[in-house]
Amino acid sequence: REWDNLGTMVTWHRHYALGDIQPAILPGLQTGVDAYRSGIVQHGVIIDPRLVEVLLVNEKYEYAGTADRIARFKSRKRKQIFDLKTGNIDYAINAIAVQMAMYANAEYIYNWQTQERLPMPEIDKTRGVIIHLPAGQGKCEMYELDLVAGWEAAQMAMEVRAWRKRKDLHLDRKTPIVTGK
């Protein structure tokens, strides 16, 4: 396999996105690195280093997660959620749409180092972008996802989570049902 350590590859992409263009590259990772670089250039992706691996929080719905990138295409004004995936995306596409929609609908960015709540940039809540770097293939593909549908599913899941927390399902908790009389 070209990438014996996918975590190393993802770490390299983080360094590249943050502007550290020459981090050490382990043997066997160069084709993946080159594919990422050329894919970013080819698709005209503008990455703001301050918006790489940011912790996004939504207190209303009680969730948080780390987005790989908040970036934009040169041809567009609005930023989008970009998520880096190295595995088979067909199997998990629905879950990825939910994940990215939740990132797009976060209330704020939390900087855990300074403990500051930072405002969310204006973000496209209708479409997100998967940066797909299939392991060992040396190629970079980008796919847009429907975040409106992802957010619908996220809200359904949050409703189920709220329902499961209910404590009022016993009609009369103080009086047990007596049977067999």
Image (cartoon, rainbow, N blue to C red):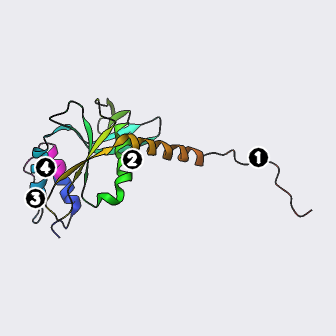
The residue type indicated by label 4 comes to Gly
Displayed quadrant of residue 26: bottom left
Q: Nearer the viewer, residue 113 or 118?
A: 118
In the image, taking residue 103 as reference, residue 61 lies left or right, namely right
- The residue wearing badge 4 is 39
Cα distance between the residues tagged 1 and 3 = 63 Å
Which residue corresponds to mark 1? 171
| Circle number at residue 162 | none
Q: Is residue 98 above or below residue 177?
A: above
Q: Between tags 1 and 2, which lies in front?
A: 2
- Residues at circles 3 and 2 in contact by the CB criterion of under 8 Å: no
Seen at 10% across and 58% down, the residue is 25
Residue placed under numbered mark 3 in the picture: 25
Q: Secondary structure at mark 1?
A: loop
Marks 3/2: CA distance?
32 Å
Q: Earlier in the sequence, mark 3 or mark 2?
A: 3
* Residues packed near mark 2 inside 10 Å, few (<14), some (14 to 19) or many (20 plus): many
- Is residue 20 visible in the rendered structure shown here? no
Which residue ends up furthest to the left in the rendered image?
Answer: 22
The tag earlier along the polypeptide, 1 or 3, is 3
Residue at horizontal 77 percent and vertical 48 percent from the top: 173
- Left/right placement of residue 33 relative to residue 169 reads left
Residue at numbered disc 2? 98
Quick one: label 1 or label 4, which is nearer the N terminus?
4
The residue lying at 16 percent from left, 44 percent from top is: 17
For the record, the magenta segment spans: 13-23
Residue 168 vertical position relative to residue 33 in the rendered view, above or below: above
Q: Position of residue 181 (x, y in %)?
A: 92, 62
Q: Earlier in the sequence, mark 1 or mark 2?
A: 2
**Chain-order first, disc 3 or disc 4:** 3
Question: CA–CA distance between discs 1 and 2?
Answer: 35 Å
